[in-house]
Image (cartoon, grey):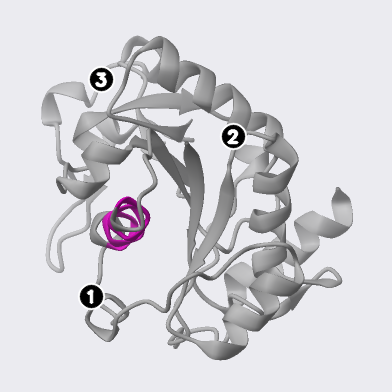
């Protein structure tokens, strides 16, 4: 049995209520729910939340909310792994046998069900603990610089100052969209990033919505799409 878990707490501060704020005609969380349902991989698409309004919206778009997330897992400092681990443990305690769970973040308006499916294929092929989407850096971090208050710019890796960008190793960053993981990996608290394979995605499908400026930029992208 495989489930999708969408972690959506109610306490967003930089964009109040962003998980259910209307984006291009739908509550933001609806895009994650819709993509998960379209895959036909999941036995259950679950929203983990501490908020009654979010739970009502989630159910109206086809997700289930079989439990309310404990307060200790719904604060500003809570990281992802224990939240998904809690959901997996809940199902295990109810008598289900979970093979895998896919965490899908709630603010991913451009997510595609095909990416969830293709990443799952990589997950099974590699027998991985985790698989998550990555995107290449626009500029090579190997030539990154700091800007001291007094003095000239400084290379973090001064040995690369004269090296052409194309001659440096490719680097990737977490796309911040979804994470396939073995049920045991979530429950045991295994770190996602250092134990996961990267599924390469196009940067045009990725937007990190943390503040109002990000939200506006995402709306512009939606209009272009």
What is the magenta segment's predominant secondary structure?
A: helix
Please check the rendered image and state whether residue 16 is part of the magenta-colored stretch, yes or no. Answer: no
Q: Secondary structure at mark 1?
A: loop
Say few, some or many: other residues with alpha carbon within 10 Å of mark 2 (under 14 / 14 to 19 / 20 or more). Answer: many
With 115 as the anchor, is 60 left or right in this view? right
Image coordinates of residue 12 in percent, x first then y, are 46, 84
Vertical placement of 146 versus 28: above or below? above
User: What residue would you read off at disc 2?
Assistant: 116
Q: Secondary structure at mark 3?
A: loop
Image coordinates of residue 204 in percent, x first then y, are 67, 40
Image coordinates of residue 182 in percent, x first then y, are 32, 34
User: What residue would you read off at disc 1?
Assistant: 77
Task: Choose the circle earlier in sequence order: 2 or 1.
Answer: 1
User: What residue would you read off at disc 3?
Assistant: 162
Q: Residue at x 31, y 16 (%)?
A: 168
Q: Residue at x 65, y 46 (%)?
A: 36
């Amino acid at each position: 049995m495989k489930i999708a878990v969408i972690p959506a707490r109610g306490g967003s501060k930089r964009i109040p209520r962003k998980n259910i704020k209307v984006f291009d005609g739908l509550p933001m969380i609806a895009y994650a729910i819709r993509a998960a349902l379209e895959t036909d991989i999941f036995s259950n698409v679950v929203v983990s939340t501490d908020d009654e309004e979010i739970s009502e919206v989630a159910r109206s778009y086809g997700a289930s909310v079989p439990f309310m997330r404990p307060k200790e897992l719904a604060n500003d400092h809570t990281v992802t792994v224990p939240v998904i681990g809690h959901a997996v443990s809940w199902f295990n305690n109810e008598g289900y046998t979970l093979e895998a769970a896919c965490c899908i973040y709630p603010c991913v308006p451009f997510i595609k069900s095909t990416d969830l499916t293709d990443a799952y294929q990589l997950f099974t092929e590699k027998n991985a603990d985790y698989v998550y989407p990555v995107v290449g850096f626009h500029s090579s971090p190997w030539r990154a610089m700091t800007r001291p208050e007094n003095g000239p710019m400084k290379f973090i890796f001064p040995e690369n100052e004269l090296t052409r960008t194309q001659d440096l190793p490719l680097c990737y960053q977490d796309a911040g969209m979804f994470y396939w993981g073995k049920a045991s990996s979530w429950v045991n608290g295994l770190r996602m990033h250092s134990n996961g394979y990267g599924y390469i995605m196009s940067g045009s499908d990725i937007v990190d919505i943390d503040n109002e400026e990000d939200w506006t930029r995402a709306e512009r992208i939606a209009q272009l799409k």
